[in-house]
């Protein structure tokens, strides 16, 4: 996910539940006898967790899922069911640059961020589907305390008699989540996994869920992993790896694929050395002794100077042939729901110097951005390239429209998510019949968003849905991202209900179909069916949707494949 030039309002919701004990007052002057309602409590193998009730949702925030040591894989937590642990506050997010977009960067941040959160209606019920959310943020920003994806709304909105266990996780980011320590004095092989330690964190969280979630009534044999943007790319890596996908059954990828975040081992090594120079460390001991405050002072500079945190096919934690592994059935048992939005990266076409809602006048601005990305991440397994040695494909793409700026932006958007999402659906459908593809086109009226959010509005120059729009409706938080979604009072309840129903049905059964959802045909080589989400009243499953675009892009060999 590219850094967005907007401001997102932070929402803090504090809900107090009190129970009146002792009946009515018997006479004047007698004080009332109020106590807080009994807090929901769950006993799992790793602790007796005391959460809080929030308007019909039992919340357990800040549960440790792994023991932390700097730049080493997390180990199993050492607490037991005899330990009473109050979990009512979000756990720390990973250290990250302060950003007005990323709410997590504005709260507590630490190197030690191995925390997750659990939400459900009824802790005493059982056999509920489990959804595990992995946040995005370019592997640089993000955390579970962002109101954009607070699960309480999703859980509360489930119909009467329906429930799930919704888990959200934090994990290590930036160089703390992926770097090469081999250039430092005192390096030993025990630090080799630092190159992809964020993936190991995610796997550790899934292991904790598998071993403990039944205490909340979750079915450990019915787990869906869902992620957006870099979180979606993370999900794709987990899906391809049998060591990780043993802990879940289904995957939901929202605008997130590995092609956007892949970097080479050589780039990781180079950028790691730059990072150590910025931090002023020369040895493992000096690196691991750094305090949160010392890292926080340097994190913005590190982010500006390196690509660390992105995913590297190191040959150990991530297979050097992960795409071939996926094609050959490494995730054959994993159901897949995957999709993207039609204006993914449209903010890159905005003329920020003159208008927050109009496009640049020169297509070369966007063209140069594509070229730079292809140059800086060249020769990386996991990426594909649209410019190559000549402009043949680009010129053909321009012919699809009489607007060169829009056509160039369309090409950039396709690289970001829609085309690789289609490819992923195609390949997975060869191994599993439960594959569903969507393409989100619905967006609130551009002028209404501008009127409501003013200078902080985030709108496409062409009025399209931009990156994260679908997530707003999946979680249904309304106030979580008003700069993108506009006036909460005008946000379509029907669209929220349809999206949440599809997500819940898929998590429960592997099939998104159900009341309120238009008939959604699985994607395969015969149907080639995409659910097009055009408006809150129009969801249409279309075959060969946008084939003129994809027929052009099929000339690109994706993910390092050869002719």
Image: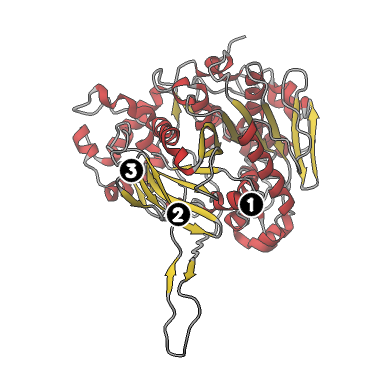
Farthest top residue in view: 563
Label 1 close to label 2 by CB (< 8 Å): no
Q: Secondary structure at mark 2?
A: loop
Q: CA distance from mark 3 to mark 1?
A: 31 Å
Task: Say whether disc 3 or disc 2 marks the residue closer to the N-terminus.
Answer: 2
In percent of the image, x 58 and y 29: which residue is there? 250
Quadrant location of the C terminus in the rendered image = top right
Q: Secondary structure at mark 1?
A: helix
Residue 82 picture location, percent across and down: 30, 45
Q: Residues within 10 Å of mark 1 (few under 14, many from 20)?
A: some
Quadrant location of the N terminus in the rendered image = top right
Residue 339 picture location, percent across and down: 65, 34
Q: Is residue 121 above or below residue 222?
A: below
In percent of the image, x 64 and y 39: which residue is there? 503
Q: Secondary structure at mark 3?
A: loop
Task: Decide if residue 476 is on the left or right side of residue 439.
Answer: left
Residue 110 picture location, percent across and down: 34, 47
Where is mark 1, residue-wise?
Answer: 157
Task: Say whether disc 1 or disc 2 marks the residue closer to the N-terminus.
Answer: 2
Q: Is residue 422 above or below residue 65?
A: above
Closest to the observer, 383 or 235: 235
Where is mark 3, residue-wise?
Answer: 81
The residue mark sitting in front, 1 or 2, is: 2
Q: Which mark is residue 40?
A: 2
The residue mark sitting in front, 3 or 1, is: 3
Task: Say whether disc 3 or disc 1 marks the residue closer to the N-terminus.
Answer: 3
Inspect this view and state whether residue 45 appears. yes
Q: CA distance from mark 3 to mark 2?
A: 15 Å
Closest to the observer, 24 or 445: 24
Task: Decide if residue 523 is on the left or right side of residue 431.
Answer: right
Closest to the observer, 302 or 90: 90
Q: How many numbered marks does the figure carry?
A: 3
């Amino acid at each position: 996910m590219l850094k967005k030039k907007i401001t997102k309002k932070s929402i803090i919701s504090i809900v107090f539940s009190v129970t009146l004990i002792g009946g009515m007052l018997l006479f004047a002057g007698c004080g009332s006898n109020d106590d807080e309602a009994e807090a929901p409590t769950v006993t799992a193998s790793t602790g007796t967790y005391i959460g809080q009730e929030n308007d019909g949702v039992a919340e357990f925030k800040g549960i440790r899922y792994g023991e932390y040591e700097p730049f080493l894989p997390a180990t199993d937590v050492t607490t037991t069911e005899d330990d009473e642990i109050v979990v009512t506050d979000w756990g720390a997010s990973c250290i990250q640059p302060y950003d007005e977009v990323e709410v997590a960067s504005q709260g507590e941040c630490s190197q030690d961020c191995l925390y997750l959160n659990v939400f459900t209606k009824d802790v005493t019920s059982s056999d509920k589907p489990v959804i595990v959310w992995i946040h995005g943020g370019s592997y640089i920003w993000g955390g579970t305390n962002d109101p954009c994806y607070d699960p309480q709304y999703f859980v509360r909105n489930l119909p009467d008699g329906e429930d799930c266990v919704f888990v959200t996780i934090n994990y290590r980011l930036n160089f703390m989540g992926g770097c090469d320590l081999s250039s430092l004095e005192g390096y030993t092989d025990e630090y080799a996994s630092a190159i992809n330690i964020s993936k190991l964190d995610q796997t550790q969280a899934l292991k904790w869920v598998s071993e403990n979630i039944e205490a909340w009534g979750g079915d450990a044999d019915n787990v869906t992993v869902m992620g957006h943007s870099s979180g979606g790319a993370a999900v794709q890596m987990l899906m391809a790896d049998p060591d990780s996908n043993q802990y879940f059954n289904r995957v939901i990828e929202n605008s997130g694929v590995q092609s956007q975040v892949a970097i080479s081992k050589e780039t990781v090594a180079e950028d790691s050395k730059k990072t150590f120079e910025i931090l002023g460390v020369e040895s493992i001991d000096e690196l691991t002794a750094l305090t949160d405050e010392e890292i926080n002072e340097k994190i913005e500079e590190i982010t500006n100077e390196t690509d660390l945190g992105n995913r590297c096919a190191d040959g150990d934690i991530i297979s050097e042939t992960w795409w071939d592994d996926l094609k050959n059935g490494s995730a054959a048992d994993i159901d897949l729901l995957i999709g993207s939005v039609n204006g993914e990266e449209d903010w890159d076409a905005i003329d920020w110097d003159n208008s927050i809602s109009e496009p640049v006048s020169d297509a070369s601005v966007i063209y140069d951005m594509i070229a730079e990305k292809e140059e800086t991440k060249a020769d990386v397994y996991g990426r594909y390239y649209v410019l190559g040695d000549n402009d043949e494909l680009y010129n053909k793409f321009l012919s699809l429209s009489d607007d060169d700026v829009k056509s160039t932006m369309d090409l950039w958007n396709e690289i970001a998510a829609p085309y690789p999402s289609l490819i992923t659906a195609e390949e997975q459908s060869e191994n599993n019949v439960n594959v569903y593809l969507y393409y989100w086109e619905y967006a609130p009226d551009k002028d209404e968003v501008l009127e409501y959010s003013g200078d902080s509005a985030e709108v496409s120059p062409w009025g399209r849905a931009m990156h994260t729009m679908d997530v707003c409706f999946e979680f249904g938080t309304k106030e979580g991202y008003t700069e993108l979604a506009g006036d909460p009072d005008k946000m379509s309840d029907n669209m929220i209900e349809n999206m949440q129903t599809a997500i819940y049905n898929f998590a429960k059964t592997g099939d998104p179909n159900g009341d309120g959802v238009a008939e959604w045909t699985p994607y395969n080589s015969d149907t080639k069916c995409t659910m097009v989400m055009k408006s809150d009243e129009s969801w249409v499953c279309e075959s060969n949707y946008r084939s003129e675009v994809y027929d052009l892009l099929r000339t690109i060999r994706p993910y390092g494949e050869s002719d």
